[in-house]
Amino acid sequence: MIKAYLLKGVLLSLVFASCGKSDMMKDRPGLTANSLDSQTLTLAQDATTRYLAAQNGPDETSALQTLINQSVSGDIIIIQAGNHYFNGTVHINKNGLTIRGENNGTDPTNYMRKAVTSSGQGVAVLDVDAGILHTVIDWIYIDGGMLPEPNLRVFGDDTKIYNSHFRNSGHSGILIHNANRIWMEGVKTYYNYVVGISQWGSSDNRIKNSQTYENGGEGITIDGGSHNCFVENVWIYKNNLSKRGVGAIGIDAANGANIFNCTIDQTNGHAIRFQNNLNQPDDGCQVYNNQITNNQGCAISMRHPELVTNFGQWENTMTNNTGGSVCSEP
């Protein structure tokens, strides 16, 4: 929440292999998204499909960028199984492209990994550029190696992200900035230095049937005018591990946030936190039908509660939270 996260993106040791942590995915049904709607199927009939083969070492930034530059709306780029290393940012700069990874029907089998650049700084692996519409990202896996910058940055509207993993970023798994109507389903963000899914100035987004867990800060932020964000059936587990955020879900200057049918548990801090650093209203936010348990703080915490207007919460199970159920402070 509203922190100088980029300044905290200190270069850490490169981590490309499994971290040895439990995946925490078992027994969590309904996480695979139906990634092809009727419009996408119609476009696919005339699409050109291009393939990025895994090089298992050499930098593939230029190779993937070339495939994108060759594509037109409706085309599909397949990230093939194996290890792909990137020491630069690949820009999705065409409308209507699909970037899809090979998969086993349960998890991606392609591994897009950040590599250390010559300057020793990290980069985002993928950017959806500002002004770009209707990008589909499906079945990709990005490991950030704990290098600075998010794994994926979304600046373009109407982006859909399905069935993908974003882990080990030295910043956020996914950063959504001034991008609207983003749909995320079947997404997993975990082990990131700060936030799993970070939203700023981005309205009418939906995050559903997903998981965000064991991030150093929030699992999800809804910040800076990110109005009408819907968070549905998301497992938000053991976030704010390093107290780099304000809880599991952080809200600041965002109206119409709806959080429902979620499980929020074992946060190192508050489960849902209205932080209100920007001193602007959070109007019409609704929290309902959630399981909010075993958090090291309040189930719902309001800082400057006078800014939280027309708030509703109902049918939530809020037990074993050390700070209580609904809390407020000046």
Image (cartoon, helix red, strand yellow):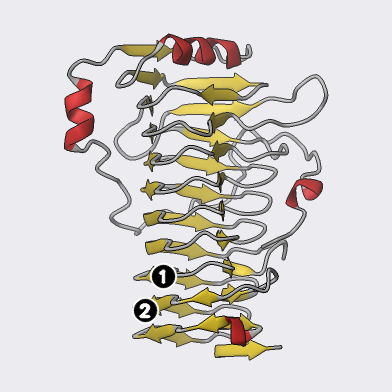
Residue under the point 74% across and 52% down: 5
Residue 125 is situated, as x and y percent measured from the top left of the image, at 59, 29
**Residue of label 2:** 288
The residue pinned by badge 1 equals 259
The mark found on residue 15 in the picture is none
- At horizontal 21% and vertical 38% (from top left) the residue drawn is 37
**Circles 1 and 2: CB atoms closer than 8 Å:** yes
Q: Amino acid at mark 2?
A: Tyr
Give how far across and how far down residue 152 sits, in percent. 55, 37
Query: Which quadrant of the view contains residue 201?
Result: bottom right
Image side of residue 34 versus residue 26, left or right: left
Q: Secondary structure at mark 2?
A: strand
Which of pointers 1 and 2 lies earlier in the amino acid sequence?
Answer: 1
- Which quadrant of the rendered structure holds the N terminus? bottom right
Distance from label 1 to label 2 (Cα)? 7 Å
Instruction: Tell me which amino acid carries mark 1.
Output: Ile
